[in-house]
Image (spheres, rainbow, N blue to C red):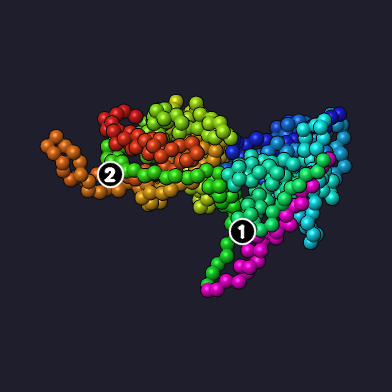
């Protein structure tokens, strides 16, 4: 008989935690290999977590709605058991709560042992192994928070973990001139007085807004909208955004699609939209400018050899999700069209798999679908660029002909691209964007599909 830990699986490069939606099993229940044990949710997609062993559920460590870091043990399975164990209540999970501290400052003692490099922060509640997620470390780096300051921040997460909320509250207090932790050292130990825990600002704000003037309706964000909001704020905090704009004459592209769309659907069994045409142009330009297809890991630039294009898709609920077309450079126009339509249908019908939203290296969003001429999209972390295409409009423009300049009615479209200025300078960003516009303008109206 052995105990097997079931851990929160890795769900994508940029996903650091997931929310428990529903448990399908309880302590004492038998479970088979690969049988679904619980449902979880991230800011990208909902998913099921299967069992990694056959046996009996020994213990469940988290409750519904708990936010769990990736790699954390969420349940334990007893294998080789002949009889089910007696059901026990769900273990009290280390949930994120506001720490109630006395009026006087709490004192943290950091014990440094010459025999070990592990650092423990000791409070009146015992020793806490400090863990910092990549998100917290990124925020600390961007806000100039030293490790000494970081170690002094009281964590309200699992086992004293410093959460995003904790460090943002600390940074906000520092900017407003509030009291901050100060460290002083002695020969044997370093005593770090912690800043007093401030009341939950979001909670106080909601309490202050209990009365509203005028005729209003209050609608609470659904779970997915909350996750999207958090993801967007995190992206803005991580990457310095710059947006460049250009326009393209897409007359040839529009006329070609109008000419072949009926035959295309009849022959291939799927519709051809503008999206695969845009993706094809983007892929060609990424091959010319591979630095656009990268991510940043500390001081290392990770250039991705795979070209996986995410396409922002609006859901019936009004929320947004970004399914990913894997290895888009290896697909022809028919393959791209089928992938685009299949992923869009799966997204709208709630049938996307976790893998369908993972691994994106560049994102396209079509703001023109809803009539917008242009937009300033937010980067989909950990990517470094995202392109928006606007509505295609007929406009009178000046064109050059062998007989001289003339005015003609053309199909025009604005393109914009937001990029991470830590990696992509204006010259590269503008050059890439212009290259995509030229690809669309030079579309061959006589091509086959």
- Residue at 84% across / 50% down in the picture? 124
Give the percent coordinates (x, y) of residue 263: 33, 34
Res 447 quadrant in image? top left
The residue at which mark 1 appears reads as 176
Query: Is residue 431 visible from the viewing direction of this image?
Result: yes
Where does the N terminus fall, quadrant-wise? top right
The residue at which mark 2 appears reads as 411
- Tell me which numbered mark, 1 or 2, is placed earlier along the sequence: 1
C-alpha span from label 1 to label 2: 51 Å
Numbered disc 2: secondary structure: strand
Give the percent coordinates (x, y) of residue 42: 62, 44
Q: Badge 2: how crowded within 10 Å, few (<14), some, or many (20+)?
A: many
- Residue at 70% across / 44% down in the picture? 148
Query: Is residue 30 visible from the viewing direction of this image?
Result: no
Q: Is residue 232 above or below residue 298?
A: below
Magenta-colored span:
188-214
Q: Is residue 338 above or below residue 42?
A: above
Q: Left or right: where does residue 431 sit relative to residue 305?
A: left
The reply to whether the magenta stretch includes residue 193 is yes
Q: Is residue 299 above or below residue 376?
A: above
- Residue at 16% across / 43% down in the picture? 406
């Amino acid at each position: 008989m052995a105990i097997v830990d079931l851990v929160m699986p890795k769900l994508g490069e940029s996903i650091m935690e997931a929310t428990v939606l529903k448990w399908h099993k309880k302590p004492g229940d038998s479970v088979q290999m690969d049988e679904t044990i619980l449902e979880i949710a991230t800011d990208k997609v909902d998913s099921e977590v299967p069992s990694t062993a056959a046996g009996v559920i020994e213990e469940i460590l988290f409750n519904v709605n708990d936010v769990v870091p990736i790699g954390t043990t969420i349940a334990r399975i007893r294998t080789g058991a002949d009889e089910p164990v007696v059901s026990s209540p769900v273990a009290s999970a280390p949930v994120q709560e506001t720490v109630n501290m006395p009026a006087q400052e709490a004192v943290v003692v950091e014990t440094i042992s010459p025999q070990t490099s592990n650092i423990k922060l000791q409070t009146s509640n015992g020793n806490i192994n400090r863990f910092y997620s990549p998100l917290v470390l990124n925020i600390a780096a961007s806000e100039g928070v030293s490790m000494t300051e970081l170690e002094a921040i009281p964590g309200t997460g699992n086992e004293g973990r410093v959460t995003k909320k904790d460090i943002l509250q600390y940074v906000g207090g520092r900017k407003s001139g509030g009291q901050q932790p100060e460290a002083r050292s002695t020969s044997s130990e370093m005593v770090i007085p912690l800043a007093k825990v401030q009341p939950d600002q979001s909670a106080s704000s909601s309490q202050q807004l209990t009365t509203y003037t005028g005729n209003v309706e209050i609608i609470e964000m659904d779970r997915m909208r909350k996750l999207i909001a958090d993801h967007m704020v995190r992206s803005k905090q991580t990457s310095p955004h710059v947006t460049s704009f250009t326009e393209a004459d897409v007359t040839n592209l529009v006329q070609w699609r109008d000419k072949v769309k009926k035959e295309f659907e009849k022959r291939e069994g799927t519709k051809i939209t503008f999206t695969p045409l845009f993706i094809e142009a983007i892929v060609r330009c990424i091959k010319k400018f591979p630095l656009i297809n990268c991510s940043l890991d500390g001081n290392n630039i990770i250039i991705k050899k795979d070209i996986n294009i995410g396409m922002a898709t609006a859901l019936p609920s009004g929320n947004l999700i970004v399914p990913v077309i894997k290895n888009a450079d290896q697909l022809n126009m028919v393959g791209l069209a089928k992938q685009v339509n299949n992923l869009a249908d799966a997204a709208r019908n709630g049938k996307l798999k976790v893998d369908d939203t993972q691994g994106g290296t560049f994102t396209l969003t079509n703001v023109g679908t809803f009539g917008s001429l242009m937009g300033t999209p937010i980067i989909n972390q950990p990517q470094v660029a995202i392109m928006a295409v606007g509505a295609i409009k007929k406009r009178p423009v000046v064109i050059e002909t062998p007989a001289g300049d003339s005015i003609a009615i053309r199909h025009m479209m604005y393109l914009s691209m937001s990029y991470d200025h830590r990696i992509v300078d204006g010259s590269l960003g503008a050059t890439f964007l212009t290259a995509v516009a030229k690809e669309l303008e030079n579309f061959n109206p006589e091509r086959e599909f």
